[in-house]
Structures are given as C-alpha cells and as structure tokens.
Image: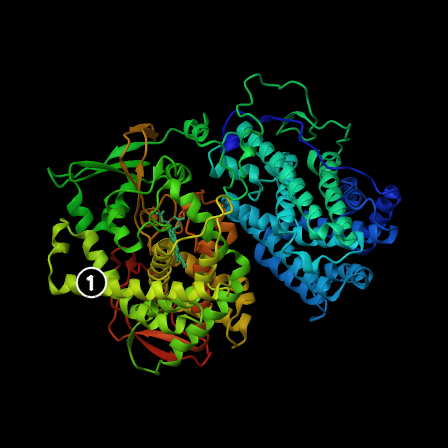
C-alpha cells in the first residue's frame, strides 16, 4: 500500500538546524560506561538475538552512550545502572520494530510483556521470552531499587508497564496499517518513548525523589516530553519510514493532516523550538517560585536540561537512525535522502524540485501543544489533497435506474442494502440521484480514504445531520471541522487506553446484572436485551456510581423513546408534521425535556464534587482546553453526553445482537468460540487482561462488523470544489461511504455472503487494502469509542458465552437486516441455555445468513 510520502515524487527533505538551547555533556567515564554496558547486554540478553551478527548490529548502534549523555553528572555506578537500563529497553524496542521478532504480533508481544511484568513484580515464575527479559530486568532492579523510595518503586513498575503497553500498541498499528491522529499518536509515544521512566532515571541519576512535586512540574514535563518525542520522530524519520512505522508524528502530519513531506518537517521543527523554549520558561518559573530554593529541585531540573540536550545529541550520532555503518561527523542540518541506506547531511538536494515552503517557527509563538500539529490554517487549506502520479486512474459511473423527480430515492428507501451493494461493481465513484440532486458513493478504498482523510474538504453536514442535531446538538459526531478539532481534544483523554481498565470492570458488573436475570429456556428479544445492556454500560461508564444510580434508570426509560422519535423525523419526507401537537409529538417533546433535566442535574452534581472520579462525565466536567484554558459549558457537555450515549449504545447493541444471531446459525463457529473461551478463561469470567488473548472472539466480531456494520451509510458535504476519481465535484455536494457496500464487495472480500471469521487471520488479512474495512471510519472523524466499543463487545461476548448459549427459537431462520440509523436485526427471539461445556456436534455449515 502506498502512503503519502512514498506516492509523491519527493523523497528527500531539508532538516534545518534545530535550536539546541540546552547543554550537552558526556559523563567523564562515558566510554568505559558504554563498553561495560555492551558487556552487560551480551551477558544478560545475548540469547535474545537470533545470531551473533544481530547482537553486533545492535551494539554498533551505540545505545550504551545514551545513559552517559543524559546523566553526565551522576555518580559512576548510578550512571552505569542507567546506561544498562536504557540499553535493556532499547533491546525490547528493537524487537518491537522487527517483524520477525516481537513485532510479528501484538497479541504475542502482549503475552511476553505480561510475563515480563509478572516476573518483574515477583508475581509469576519465568516464562518463555518474558523469562529472559525478566531475568535481565531483575538484575537491573536489584541494583537500582535500593536507590529509590517506595513511591518511586511503585512509579517505576507503572512506568515499565506503560512502556510495554505503548510498544504493543505500536506493533498493532503497524500490523493494521492504522495511522492515529496527532494527539492519539503522542499519547502512545509518551508511553513507548518511556517518558515516565526517563524522568525517573533522571531522578535516580541526581539521587532525588520528585514524587511529591509531580503537580508543580507538570508544565516542565509536558514540554520536555513533547520536545524529545518530536525531535526523536524527526531524526529517526528515515528509519521509521523504511520500517513503515505508523506511530510517528511525521507520518501523522503527512497521512492524517494532508501535509507534504517538507512542510511536515518544517512544521515539526517549529514545534521543537516552541517546546524547547516553553520548557525553559516553565523550568525558570519553578526556579523562581517557592520550590526554587530546594537543592533537590535544582538538581533535578539540571538533570532534565541534560536529558533533553543529551537525547538530541545521541539521536544525531547513533547509526540506529542514520543507518548501520554511518559515522557522525558532527553535522546537524542539511538534505537527507529517505531511501539512502546510510544517510548523511548534504548541502544541496539531489532533486532541485524539493523546496521548503513554511517559515520555521512562525507558529511557535502560539502554543500548539494541544492543537495537534496544524500549521496555519490558510496554508493547509491551500494545500490541495495530494494527487500522486503513480496512483491508478479511478473510474467514475452514474448508477442507472434514476426516475424523474425521485431519482434513486425509491430504491434507497425500499431496499437500501441491496441497492448499495451493487454500486461498487459499477465504478470506484458512483453518482446516484437523491431527488434531482446528485450524490456520490465512494466505493474504491482509495477513494474512501481520500474522502475520510481530508475532513476539511469532506466535512460533516447535509440534511441528515440537521436532523441528528435534534438529538445531539453540536456534539462531537455532528460538529463541523472548525469546532470538531477543539471538541475532540477535550474528549480524547476520556478514551485514553489508561482509562480502559476501569471502564471494563464497570462493564463486567453490568453484564453480570443482565445475565443474572435470564432463565433457562425462557425466550427473550436479544436485540432489546443487548440495547438495554449497552445503554446501561455507556450510562454507567459515563456517570459512574455516585450520581449514576439515579440518572441511569431515567436515561434507560427516555432514550429508546427519543431514538425512535428522532429516527422518524430523520426519514420523514417533510418537516412540518413534527410541529403538530399530536400525542406522539407531545410525548417526544416531554421525554426530551425530561432527559435534558436529568442530565443537567447530573452535570451539576458532578461539578459540585469537582474531582476526576474516572467516569466520563467527571472527565468532561474537569476537561480544560490547553489552548484556550477554557472548560466545557453545561450545554456543551449535554451535547457530548447525548452523543456518547447514542454513539455508544446503538452501534454496540446491534453488533451484539448480530453476533448472537450468527452464532445461533453457525454452530461450528460457536464451537470454536467456546473452545477458545474455555481454553483462555477456564470457566472464569473474563477481565481486561484477557481481552487481547481472545483472538478468535475478535475475529468473529470483526467478521460480524464486516457483514453487518452498524454504521452502514455515512455522509459528508464538500466545502469547496474538489476532484474525486477524476470527476469535478461541486461545493455543497453530498459524498457518501458505506461500510456495508464495501464489506459486501466481492472484489475486496471473496464470497462476501459467507460468514468466515478466518478472513481475519493475519496471513489472510494482510493483503486487504487500507480503506477496505472501515466500520469505525478513519481519519480524524474516526470513532472515538472504537477501543471502548471493541473492549465492550469482546467482554460481553466472552462473558455470556462462558455461561450461556443462545439458541434460535424453533423455526427461526436467517434474520433480515433492518437498516435504520444503525443496522439492526429487528426483533430477535432466542432461548437461553446454560452451557455444559461439552462440545457442540453440529455440522460445519457456512452459509449465507441473509
Ligand atoms: C461497534 C461499535 C461502534 C461502531 C461500529 C462505531 C462506528 C462509528 C463510525 C463509523 C463513526 C464515524 C461516523 C462518520 O464517519 O460520520 C463513529 C464516530 C463516533 N463514535 Fe462510534 N462506533 C462504535 C462504538 C462507539 C462507542 C462505544 C462510542 C462511545 C462510547 C462511540 C462514539 C462515537 C463518537 C463520539 C463518534 C464521533 C467521532 C468524531 O467525529 O470525532 N462509538 N463511530
């Protein structure tokens, strides 16, 4: 698959001189420390390398000099411990980048990491690779821990866990080809760069404990970390590009923000300068304040100066980034060739066409920390979407069968799924008529990606969104480009993976509460039950227990009535009827008002307690926009609460209903699912740490999303004239994409009507083009709850399948999909049977379930 920078002709960039305002010094014993550390690596981790040549390759990267450069003033033994520690984590990092090692599978890597952590915390015996890494870690730990306080020891364990989690996320991104948005990328990089333990090592080097000052040092750390990550991503870009790394801010700017290579590099250089200066200002503020008189604080801040200065120096000198065999000659700026096996800074470009287009540092005056990476908007807006020369010409077609006045409205109204499914065979972009108005369906994955990755040109909007605003106001899902960026920044922390463990335990309680009420052999509507469950889960994670106990029953009562009413208004051909005071309309208005009151009261209660209790609502109430310092108003929070309640309920509820229907129709799939669940869980209820190990369960859910994506048809409106598949598209046009039509396209998924979870085995899935499977969308309008939703569906499926089988009612056949706002099963009566854990002996039939 081609990506932005590869598809363009520009394969080199100019790296300007970075500011380098902080000191660089080598530990007086640097050379000896480096060599000793190399010996330690050979002794403790030599076995982890496949061959001696691989170990030698690693040692040539000079990772052992990182410690002496970042703690030049540390006492000798501490400097040695630190050098060894950094080498240790760099070995892990190297195997993470290697697809023939840890990088082959994030699931396998997580297992190794879990074993390593268990061993590190003394909770488990050595196992497989985890044992080897664990033994080396133990040796380090034996040396380092006596020099740390109890609080630091605790932080250390957490920081190692965060690092490993970041590594696993990077592996997954590489395997799935997902490029995150800027803030999501930085969140992962903060972990995978090891920011927490880098600061701890700095404390250890200075023999100080900063645990109680973390709050006072927040700004110092924020700018220090961002400076280091951006510098690292810039200086390692040649290597990361060659390794197709997705978790780097350079790629994010190019692929998610539409920058060309040179403007992306320039923009990042501006950010480096900004963060370096902001770090210095924050540091000086601490020094000028009440803490400035403390020697431990001063020593630590001196340590951070060297950490930043030393990290950058290391990144220039290590062949890790500039290629095996490169020898640093002290150059720090010049032209770099992306394809060169060994890069060096040249004074002139090879190709005269490559020119810098953005003034470095122009944007640095405005704090760009939370805005993500946007350069001046005018420049971005003027930057046309890339049209790589080597992209094949895409085809355009007009769908036949439009009738005067109605166009294709009747087909879309009567049998939308069948109609949409046939369109990709006509062309890569297909025009249909909604009445007399043209609308376009993006069918080819490349065209879909072009639409989804350029959210400035293909913005939210259009008649359906106007109706959706009845329900969600100007919430995240319906807001337009300008508002959306600010909103997403405020909401993103609530979905950070660090929060997920807490959410999962709340989910588990709700799932248990629902299944406890089931009675053997008493049929119930699984669709209703799953919607009720997912609504409770979203409401519970949103409101927590403190204020939630009162709000949740009210929400559970109001929501279905509101959803029905809004859907009727969305599909109604005329708008006036909703204003007529019929009993139905009066009830709808009353229930909406009641819902409004309940949520407003809940917001007020949450504001009064003024702490982040870990639930979504308290995160929203306490969220601050780092750019403006502003908080969300009650009305804004209300819109977001409604958005999340709807986004998090219908989608997951329908997915769960479909999956139980499918298992009822495909006993062989069910048998394999039970086998995995029994094997992994051994009869106990699943928890957060089990989720990555339930791989077949994930495949079943993924295949369900392919066949029955809840978000089956989505729309965008063009904000300016543009081009798609060689066709000029006027401003204000409706452009659609349909995960359903894509999931049923035989050119992408052979035998699309067959439910086949094995399509998602890594070796089969790897050939799938990017943009082919987009049930959660992609780009910066990608589902914010994708991880949440996947954790929820996996947990629900695994928990229920541990204790129950849901059997179709006698005579029930395949269900017909009901395409409303979300793709549902309709009424789905099934009988719960307790599982006896003996194998199901039904014939393996994989048939069309539609
Ligand atoms: C199986 C589960 C889910 C599926 C298939 C799904 C699908 C999607 C899709 C396709 C979009 C993009 C819409 C567009 O392109 O216009 C989206 C956006 C969104 N989803 Fe989900 N979703 C799921 C679960 C969740 C959950 C659990 C939550 C919240 C707890 C959630 C909240 C949202 C929000 C707030 C947006 C708007 C994001 C933005 O525009 O920045 N979703 N979802």
- Which of the 4 image quadrants contains residue 426? top left
- Nearer to me, 678 or 604: 604
Whether ligand 1 has any atom under 8 Å from the Cβ at mark 1 is answered as no
Please indicate, yes or no, whether residue 512 appears anywhere in the rendered image. Answer: yes
Q: Position of residue 259 (x, y in %)?
A: 49, 32
Q: Quadrant of the C terminus?
A: bottom left
Residue pointed to by mark 1: 588
Horizontal side of 813 relative to 314 (left or right) equals left
- Nearer to me, 131 or 606: 606
Q: Which residue occupies 65% across, 44% down? A: 282
- Which of the 4 image quadrants contains residue 582? bottom left
- Nearer to me, 509 or 481: 481
Please indicate, yes or no, whether residue 86 appears anywhere in the rendered image. Answer: no
Q: Position of residue 240 (x, y in %)?
A: 61, 39
Q: Is residue 834 above or below residue 294?
A: below
The kind of secondary structure element at disc 1 is helix
Hey, which residue is sitting farthest top in the picture?
A: 352
- Nearer to me, 553 or 258: 553
**Residue neighbourhood size for the residue with mark 1, other residues' Cα within 10 Å, grouped as few (<14), some (14–19), many (≥20):** many
Horizontal side of 406 relative to 621 (left or right) equals left
Q: Position of residue 226 (x, y in %)?
A: 61, 43
Q: Position of residue 791 (x, y in %)?
A: 47, 62
Horizontal side of 718 relative to 71 (left or right) equals left
Horizontal side of 125 relative to 499 (left or right) equals right
């Amino acid at each position: 698959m081609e990506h932005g920078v590869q598809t363009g002709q520009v394969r080199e960039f100019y790296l300007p001189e970075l500011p380098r305002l902080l000191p660089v010094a080598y530990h007086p014993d640097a050379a000896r420390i480096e060599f000793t550390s190399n010996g330690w690596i050979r002794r403790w981790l030599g076995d982890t390398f496949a061959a001696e040549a691989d170990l030698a390759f690693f040692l040539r990267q000079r990772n052992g000099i990182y410690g002496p450069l970042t703690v030049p003033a540390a006492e000798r033994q501490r400097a040695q411990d630190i050098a060894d520690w950094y080498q240790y984590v760099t070995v892990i990092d190297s195997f993470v980048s290697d697809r023939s090692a840890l990088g082959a599978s994030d699931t396998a890597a997580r297992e190794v990491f879990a074993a390593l952590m268990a061993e590190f915390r003394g909770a488990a015996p050595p196992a497989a690779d985890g044992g080897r890494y664990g033994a080396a870690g133990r040796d380090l730990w034996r040396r380092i821990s006596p020099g740390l306080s109890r609080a630091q020891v605790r932080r250390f364990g957490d920081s190692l866990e965060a690092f490993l989690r970041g590594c696993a996320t990077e592996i997954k991104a590489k395997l799935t080809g997902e490029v995150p948005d800027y803030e999501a990328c930085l969140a992962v990089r903060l972990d995978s760069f090891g920011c927490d333990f880098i600061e701890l090592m700095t404390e250890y080097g200075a023999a100080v404990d900063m645990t109680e000052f973390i709050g006072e040092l927040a700004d110092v750390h924020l700018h220090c970390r961002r400076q280091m990550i951006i510098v690292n991503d810039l200086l390692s870009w040649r290597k990361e590009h060659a390794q197709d790394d997705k978790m780097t801010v350079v790629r994010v700017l190019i692929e998610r923000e539409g920058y060309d290579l040179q403007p992306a590099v320039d923009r990042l250089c501006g950010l480096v300068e900004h963060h370096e200066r902001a770090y210095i200002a924050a540091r000086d503020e601490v020094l000028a304040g009440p803490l400035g008189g403390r020697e431990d604080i001063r020593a630590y801040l001196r340590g951070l100066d060297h950490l930043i200065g030393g990290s950058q120096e290391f990144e220039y000198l290590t062949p890790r980034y500039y290629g095996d065999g490169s020898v640093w000659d002290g150059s720090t700026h010049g032209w770099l060739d992306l394809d060169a096996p060994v890069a060096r800074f040249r004074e002139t470009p090879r190709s005269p066409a490559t020119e810098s287009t953005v003034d470095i540092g122009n944007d640095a005056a405005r704090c760009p920390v939370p805005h993500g990476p946007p350069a001046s908007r005018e420049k971005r807006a003027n930057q046309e979407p890339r049209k790589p020369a080597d992209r094949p010409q895409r085809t355009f077609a007009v769908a036949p069968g439009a009738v005067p006045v109605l166009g294709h409205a009747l087909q879309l109204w009567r049998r939308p799924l069948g109609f949409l499914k046939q369109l990709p065979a006509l062309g890569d972009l297909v025009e249909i008529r909604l009445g007399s108005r043209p609308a376009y369906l993006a069918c080819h994955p490349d065209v879909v990606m072009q639409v989804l990755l350029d959210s400035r040109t293909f913005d939210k909007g259009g008649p359906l969104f106007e109706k959706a605003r009845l329900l969600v106001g100007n919430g995240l899902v319906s807001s337009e480009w300008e508002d959306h960026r600010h909103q997403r920044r405020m909401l993103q922390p609530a979905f950070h993976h660090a929060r997920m463990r807490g959410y999962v335990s709340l989910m588990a309680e709700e799932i248990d509460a629902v299944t406890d009420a089931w009675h053997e052999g008493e049929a119930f509507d699984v669709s209703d039950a799953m919607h009720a469950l997912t609504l409770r889960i979203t409401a519970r994670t949103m409101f927590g227990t403190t204020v939630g106990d009162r709000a949740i029953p009210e929400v559970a009562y109001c929501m279905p009535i509101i959803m029905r009413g809004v859907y009727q208004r969305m599909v109604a051909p005329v708008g006036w009827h909703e204003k007529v005071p019929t009993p139905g309309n009066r009830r709808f208005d009353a229930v909406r008002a009641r819902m409004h009151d309940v949520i407003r009261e809940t917001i007020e209660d949450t504001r009064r307690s003024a702490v982040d209790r870990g639930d979504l609502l308290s995160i929203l109430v306490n969220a601050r926009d780092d750019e403006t310092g502003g908080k969300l108003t009650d009305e804004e929070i209300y819109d977001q609460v409604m958005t999340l309640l709807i986004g998090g309920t219908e989608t997951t509820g329908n997915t769960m209903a479909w999956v139980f229907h499918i298992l009822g129709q495909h006993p062989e799939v069910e048998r394999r699912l039970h086998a995995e669940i029994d094997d992994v869980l051994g009869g106990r209820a699943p928890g957060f740490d089990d989720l990555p190990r339930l791989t077949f369960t994930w495949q079943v859910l993924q295949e369900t999303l392919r066949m029955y994506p809840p978000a089956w048809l989505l729309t965008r409106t063009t904000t300016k004239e543009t081009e798609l598949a060689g066709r000029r598209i006027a401003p204000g046009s409706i452009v659609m994409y349909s995960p359903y039509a894509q999931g049923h396209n035989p050119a992408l998924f052979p035998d699309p009507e067959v439910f086949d979870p094995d399509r998602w085995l890594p070796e089969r899935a790897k050939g799938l083009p990017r943009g082919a499977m987009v049930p959660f969308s992609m780009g910066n309008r990608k589902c914010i709850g994708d991880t949440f939703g996947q954790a929820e569906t996996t947990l629900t499926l695994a928990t229920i399948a541990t204790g129950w089988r849901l059997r179709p009612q006698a005579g029930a056949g395949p269900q017909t999909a009901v395409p409303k706002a979300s793709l549902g099963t309709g009424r789905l009566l099934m009988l719960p049977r307790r599982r006896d854990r003996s194998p199901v002996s039904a014939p393996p039939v994989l048939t069309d379930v539609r």
